[in-house]
Amino acid sequence: MGSLLLTSAALSGRHIALALLAVFGFFGLLLEHGNLGAQTIFPNISGLLSTEVNGHRSSVAGSEFWINFAPILAAAAPRCSKPEVTDDVPYFVRAPVPGSGFSERSVSVLNMEEKDVESMRRSHSWFVDQINDKAPTLEYEKGTRGIVTSAGGDYFPTLLVSLSFLRRTGSTLQVEVFLSNSEEYEEQMCEEVLPLLNAKCIILSDKIDESVLSFEIKHYQLKAFAMLFSSFEDILFLDADNFPVHPPEPLFTSEPFSSNRLVLWPDYWTPTFSPFFYTITGLERNSLEDRPTIEAGQVLVSKKHHAKTLLLAAYYNCYGDYYYRLMTQGGPGEGDKETFSSAALVLKAPLYTVDQATHPLGDRSGGALLQAHPTDDFESQSDEKVIIRPMFVHASWPPKLNAMRNIQGQRQWGSAENAADKFDGLDIEPVAWGYMVEMACKEGLEFRDWGNYNKTGLDVCGQTRRCFNDMFGREYAGEEEYSMWWAGRG
């Protein structure tokens, strides 16, 4: 059994009580569940932080929300073996008519003992009871709207392309860029470049380390926790490789967001949930089979109206080693993608899933996904004459839009004529590559990912210019439509 250490000198009586809630919750569940065997108390938690009072660092100051939520999250941790995939789960491209062709999807390729399923069911039920009874209050600035994303490492160059497209739409929404930890922090990006784009860096570990309970949040888990800690009341989360082609401000004031306060977009695939997931969560069996899977590169959500949904989604992501497998069974895109819709359905909270299927833009070698404008999609339900425009280009298929790593000799997003038809006459691909050339060739702009701030030695500029020439049959000339936000700045 894992050890539990408290440094009482560093904690007030109230904080000790909050931290011990996790311990009492654990022992209460222990009595209910029976013998836990050799499992640790908190499988994904490294233990409680000891704090040096004379070192001027308090582990309990800061977010009141997190101080209250962390013990509940810890106490409800799964205490059993992780599900094991025993075979490849069958999956198919989603049928064009929702609800058709899903009846055989609920198969299981996971290995879980009955006692482990029951243990997870009880932990899940306890957590839901806690957030339903008295959910910790999420912290945000009332009446605010903004964009939240995550980046760091080789995603910083990609993020700059996406932010350039965002500003090209005329959007002035503030952007919060979440980094997992201080190792991902780059001074030039966070202190010079991003502020010019009305964006700022936030280090998640600085916030979650304020609790006496220590969690490591990374990779797919970061999205849900970035939403929890964002300062905005209404959030459009965008992956760093995802950008809008229309200003996103109207999304917050129109349907379907104005009625549902949670809007999600579909993925290509049929669902591959394990039947164990229904047992653990209490959802009606096959209730998720008549829905599309989710492509969570964009999520539109209100923290005010969907606080409990975000708390439960954070629980699923915190223990993703368990829940990602239960939701996808090793199928396509395993990760955070199903956690938001599942949380809303478990809590019977309203949500709107865009009906218009996602479409490919180009091919699998450097292509992208197109996601529909949700207002057009909503209006098309009652008026079939409505033309559904693309709203987001998610350039998620590798290689990403990182000038050092993306080397191409021909177009990847289809013909100029196809692009003009989709994007109001704009050939969007050379715009993206124009941004990449500007970034690669701008003197003084460096990234740690580019040879540890040595793009000149790697000739990233020359390489990207050659790619532009090979792809579009002409030299990059710095035309007005391609100019970056820093054009003419020094």
Image (cartoon, rainbow, N blue to C red):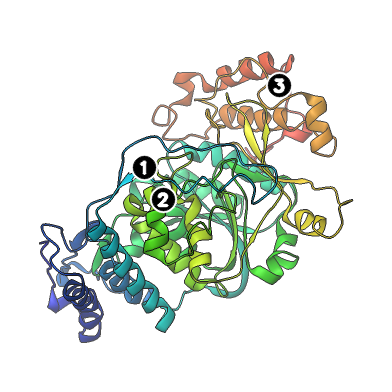
Q: Position of residue 145 (x, y in %)?
A: 63, 66
Quadrant position of residue 260: bottom right
Q: Quadrant of the N terminus?
A: bottom left
Q: Position of residue 65 (x, y in %)?
A: 39, 75
Q: Is residue 68 above or below residue 357?
A: below
Instruction: Report the residue marked by disc 1.
Output: 109
Q: Nearer the viewer, residue 98 or 207?
A: 98
Q: Reply above or below: 88 against 105.
A: above
Amino acid type indicated by mark 1 = Val
Q: Position of residue 268 (x, y in %)?
A: 60, 40
Which tag is nearer the camera, tag 1 or tag 3? 1
Q: Are there few (<14), some (14-19), or many (20+) residues within 10 Å of tag 2?
A: many
Residue 363 shows up from this direction: yes
For disc 3, the neighbor class at 10 Å (few under 14, some 14 to 19, many from 20) is: some
Q: Which mark is residue 274?
A: 2
Task: Report the Cα–Cα distance between label 2 and label 3.
Answer: 50 Å
Mark 1 → mark 2, Cα distance in angstroms: 7 Å
- The residue at which mark 3 appears reads as 476
Query: In the image, residue 197 lies at what x, y percent?
Result: 61, 50
> What kind of residue is marked 2?
Ser
- Horizontal side of 389 relative to 91 (left or right) equals right
Q: Secondary structure at mark 1?
A: loop
Q: Secondary structure at mark 3?
A: loop
